[in-house]
Amino acid sequence: MDLTILEKKVRSGEEEVLILIKWESEEHWKQWEKSDAHIAGHKARIGQPKPDYILSSEAGKYEIKAVKKAAVTK
């Protein structure tokens, strides 16, 4: 699993944070979804309000169609 965190400052002075997780395979992701640690993390938050600093949250699944290496110039 690779984890990338991107932060963008927006005009209102707030920050937008984008977290990208790249799994080794779809099967690895499915195993994590069913793991005791993942399920316990969700159960621990049942009935709790989301923190004030989280304005919205969404999840999506993307497939990598191409990876291009940039040419290095000196």
Image (cartoon, rainbow, N blue to C red):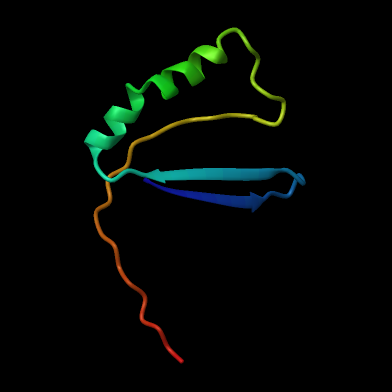
| Residue furthest to the front | 36
| Residue at the right extreme of this rendering | 13
Left or right position of 68 against 4: left
Q: How many numbered marks, from 0 up?
A: 0
Residue shown at 24%/54% (left/top)? 65
The location of residue 19, given as percent across then percent down, is 50, 43
Q: Residue furthest top?
A: 47
Q: Position of residue 9 (x, y in %)?
A: 68, 51
Q: Quadrant of residue 72?
A: bottom left
Left of 59 or right of it: where is 48?
A: right
Residue shown at the point (27%, 36%) measured from the top left: 28
Residue most toward the bottom?
A: 74
x 43%, y 32%: residue: 59
Is 5 rendered above or below residue 26? below
Q: Residue at x 30, y 68 (%)?
A: 68
Image quadrant occupied by the N terminus: top left
Front residue of this view, candidates 38 and 11: 38
The spot of residue 49 in percent (x, y) is: 65, 15
Q: Which residue is more in the foreground, 39 or 69?
A: 39
Residue 43, given in percent of the width and then of the height, sits at: 50, 12
Tell me the quarter of the picture where residue 56 sits. Answer: top right
